[in-house]
Image (cartoon, rainbow, N blue to C red):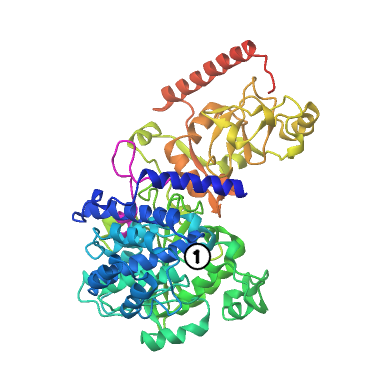
Amino acid sequence: MRKRKRTGEKTRRATVETEPLDAPEQLPLLGSSTERGTNLPDAFRRLYFHLYTNSKASRAERIFDDLSLILLLKLAIETNGGRQVLARYQKGGVKANDVLLPFLRKCYPDLVDKEQAFAIGDEALKVALAFLDRLSLTAAPAHVLGEAFQALLSPRLRGDKGQFFTPRSLVRAMVEVVAPAPAESVLDPACGTGGFLFESRVYQASDGEPSGAVVGVDKDHDLFRISSALLQLATRGRATVFNFNSLDGQHWETVKKKARVDLFDVVLTNPPFGARIGIRDSRVLAEFALGHQWIHDEEKDEWIQSRALLPAQDPQILFLELCVRKLKPNGRLGIVLPEGLFGNKGDAYIWQWLKSQGRVLALLDCPRTTFQPGTDTKTNVLFFRRYAENENVAVKYPVKVAVALHCGHDRRGRNELSSGLPYPDDFPDIGASFHGKQAAAAKRWRNVEVKVGGYIVPRYYSEGKPVTAQEEELTRGAETATLGQLLSRGVIAIKKGHEIGADAYGTGDVPFVRTSDISNFEISCDPTKSVADDVYKEYAAQQKLQPGDVVVAVDGRYRIGATAMLTERNVRCVAQSHLRIISALRPETIDPYELLFALNLPSVKLRIRDLVFVQSTLGTLGRRLLELRIPILHGPGPWRERVDKFKRVLEERDLLLRDLRVIDQTSYEL
């Protein structure tokens, strides 16, 4: 472990040496919006690595603590006339903790306590301040500053705390949906760098002079310090940020006294989430209905809260209850939550509790890449309104649902395509169309009936129709049916694969077909996972694989929906449990090639995506596979030529692969 850490340190230091910090003139002054967006993240990263290389602090978290002080000092110099203090320090003969910290405490008495001190040496600090001297933080919009800080806070620093910062386009879309009026109060109980609060203020200002309270809370002291400074700039001192654990109810009286507000018109947040950081404090759990155990009454089909506390509860669930409780009657909530909360039937008690408090206004399905590369956890957004006083809660209502396929960056965080064009982003259009005219909104938002206790994953309610004009023309006139309907009519049969256990790997030459082995409609097996003949015989009688069977991946991470066809060449195999084997029993209705072709139409593949629910990072299609609707592309029709060509290509490829297998029969193990 030590060797690995030292290797990583050498790598980072080598990077810093190639980009020395003592050349601030290479960074142009912040002028255009383009420069503001590109210089600050780069400058902050270079500054962090400079401190890492040259400071006396040993831990990344401690270095960031110093970095937050340095940037706060830079803001203080720009806004509070600290040039003389800085010049005195740069001249030499005095220490930062004796000169700069008193100045900081005077400017920000609530952000810098008496015990605070710089851990880095004065030499490294002077270089850092000289580097920042050519940059104007007050000239940059607050959201650019916030994004620069977020770029600096890598998952290595914050992922273990469940903190993953929300992309600005999603923040803005959420603000547009809840639409805070100028006089309304706004809360974020896990505010990070203050993105939701800043965007809310911008939105309020577009409709008049903002006057409502803006309150943020974050338990992380560094983030509290940064968000306080940023929001003071953005809101002209009207925002108040507090540094405490939002889930601990004893602190909220301070908010009521200082910010003069107890309940809020709007709550917007992306709370920390993850089972690894579950809340175990019984005193905290006791404050929440969702901190208790709930028992399902099978006869009444309802959940009942018990008096017993849970041993632990995920923080996002307690934050959800906190946010609802902090809403005024008729107040609105927008909250980012892991998708597991929307698709896990064991969490139905949460939705029953929500139904008792108010109405689900809308559901927004986020791409899996939204929080990558920070985390692979799939998320969605819940928009909720608390019941108004004396509201008739029995009235049925539709829920608006939207699905975003793109979020402005890929899974590596790159926001440009290889062509140089911006990466597509659906969030701006989704946010802007929520309150728009029905014709425009219908392109993004659909009114659906969502049953509490049923599926609440937003994309499940997508229509599943042809996504291109070419496909619509290709399938014109074709009958459609779900796989469940075809199964009940005896047109197809569906079987499940098996798990054989890792001990069987590499014991023979019979392929064990897994989801990763399916690509381009064929099976390409890893020989190290092949099994012995006796293992094959054990499962062959159950799976009964035949040439023409279609295998479909239904579980995993990224390969769900991948398909392939078994042939005489590869039918001798064992299929993994993550696969379903579909057999075409009545070729006069649909043959295997027509089935395989239909399963790979763009609209069908998109619908498969809609039917996959993600629990943390693993997705599953499960029995929802039977709900998948496909066109029956049999007999004459506009599809005939394409389907016949598809069949011909696959058959010819299989013959070629069989010939290659005869040629290449010898292999040697390394």
Q: Does residue 234 appear in the picture of this structure?
A: no
Q: Does residue 529 appear in the picture of this structure?
A: yes
Residue found at x 48% / y 64%: 62
Name above or below for residue 400 compared with residue 101: above
- Which x, y percent locates residue 53? 44, 53
Question: Which quadrant holds residue 77?
Answer: bottom left
> How many tags in the picture?
1
Q: Point out the residue furthest to the front here.
A: 93
Q: Which of 481 and 355 is in front in this view?
A: 355
Q: Which of 358 and 469 is in front in this view?
A: 358
In terms of secondary structure, where does tag 1 sit? loop
Q: Which of 588 and 563 is in front in this view?
A: 563
- Quadrant placement of the C terminus: top right
Q: What stretch is highlighted in magenta?
A: 412-431
Callout 1 environment at 10 Å: few (<14), some (14 to 19), or many (20+)?
A: many
> Viewed as shown, does residue 368 lie left or right of 670?
left
> Viewed as shown, does residue 506 lie left or right of 477?
right
Question: Which quadrant holds residue 212?
Answer: bottom left
> Viewed as shown, does residue 320 lie left or right of 214?
right
Name above or below for residue 44 compared with residue 621: below
Q: Which amino acid type is marked by label 1?
A: Pro
- Which x, y percent locates residue 157? 49, 58
Which residue is labeled 1 in the image? 272
Residue found at x 49% / y 28%: 634
Residue 530 part of the magenta segment: no
- Which x, y percent locates residue 266? 36, 74
Residue 416 part of the magenta segment: yes
> Viewed as shown, does residue 420 lie left or right of 599?
left
The secondary structure that dominates the magenta segment is loop
- Which x, y percent locates residue 66? 42, 65
Residue found at x 51% / y 74%: 321
Name above or below for residue 286 compared with residue 669: below
